[in-house]
Image: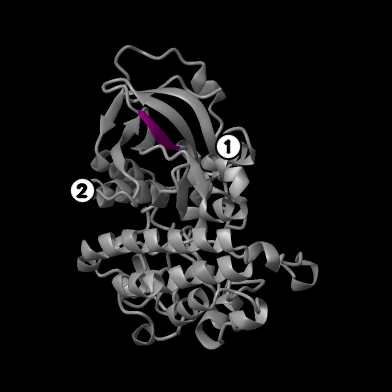
Amino acid sequence: MPPKVIGPYRVLETIGTGGAGSVYRAVDRRSGDTVALKLLSTGPALDPSAARRLAREFETLSDLSHPNVVKVFDTGVHRGYPYLAMELVEGLTLRHYLSLRAEDLSSPTGSFSELRRKMVGRAFAEPWSTEGSISHEGNRVFGLSAYAQEFPSEEPEFSSGPGSVRALADAADEPDTLDNSSDVDLPNEVEQPAERPSESSPQVDLTELNRPERIGRLKDSMLQLCQALIYIHGHGLVHRDLKPSNVMVDEDRLVRLMDFGLARFLADDATGNARGRLVGTFRYMAPEQVLGEQLDGRADLYSLGVVMYEMLSGRVPFDAQSPYELCQRVLETEAPPLSELNPHSDLQLSRIAHRLIRKEPDDRFQTAEEVYEALSE
């Protein structure tokens, strides 16, 4: 059972659960607004870096307002549990949105509604998921059964603001948490590729990928994503983790860019995190991000190109059985031409995708505005 109360929020139901926390549908008892409430685990399972990402996500988004960027409302600590209240997006991840047919989208009782309910929780919780990611020794799925049995007091013990979350993370952090003697330095924030041998990979249905209605939705989604990037880049912000699971589409086909837990302001020198450790998701990282170099908005544009490439071909441009091998491919090899993987792929989108994933930032589109204009032609 979920807890009944978290800070000033009354919990309605569980949306999703991951390795480091859970996400709930909740109501703000002060305003009556419905929100999505991220709650991190605590005790031995508390990941200090996850808590700091949660605080950073609030700090990053609290002053931003754009239709294509998710909103955040509040953050704090309730009885030792860090939480983040954010806009509840009733929708699907980009990948699942594009997998549906037009009739599914228009049917109120069809598969779109069913799939939305199943996938919205995963979209919020995916950054914590252990599927395809580096496991945290000692971490486990966060169980709230015992906590739910506690009778909520009239005045819950909680503190608000990102400072309270950072203080909890600092208290939980240990001096040796960044020590790593392995050959490949893998931080908690970086997703490890799941094993996907090419011999056993299912064949992509190119006819489905190339449906004109689907391509129209893909193009519209990319235009909206460009608008989100224009906005955040204009505020000096680099997302650093743009991927299909961080893009949500609601029933009105409004796209939201989600999960700003790894975002950095250019003024803060948007490179890797402490001691040069990488942050992001390998399959969508720009070469300069893999190298831990200083980043600007062109790193997000590279990730946008990877997303576009994947949506056009059914596969990412680079994949491998280990993070080290994947990084090598991102840095040293060229992606297979989309014309070979999908001979009938949309030519305009294919050209844009290939230009976006060029190795050198100077060879790509330089701004999200340029990408928007190219998509609009």
Type of amino acid under label 1: Ser
Using the image, tell me which numbered label, if any, was put on residue 52. none
Image point (59%, 49%), residue name: 102
Point out residue 183 in the picture as x, y percentages from the top left corner: 55, 75
> Is the stretch drawn in magenta largely helix, strand or loop?
strand
Q: Considering the numbered disc 1 on the image, is that residue within a helix, a strand or a loop? A: helix
Point out residue 361 in the picture as x, y percentages from the top left corner: 36, 83
Up the image or down, 40 lies above or below 243; here it is above
| Residue carrying label 1 | 113
Q: Residues within 10 Å of mark 1 (few under 14, many from 20)?
A: some
Up the image or down, 376 lies above or below 247; here it is below
User: Relative to 200, is 243 on the left or the right?
Assistant: left
Q: Earlier in the sequence, mark 2 or mark 1?
A: 2
Image point (61%, 78%), residue name: 325
User: Relative to 36, is 102 on the left or the right?
Assistant: right
Image point (43%, 40%), residue name: 89
| Residue carrying label 2 | 63
The image quarter containing residue 26 is top left
What segment is highlighted magenta in the picture? 34-39
Near-viewer residue (199 or 194): 199
Point out residue 150 in the picture as x, y percentages from the top left corner: 47, 16
**In this rendering, does residue 374 appear at all?**
yes
Near-viewer residue (138 or 85): 85
Front label number (2 vs 1): 1
Residue 36 magenta:
yes
Quadrant holding the C terminus: bottom left
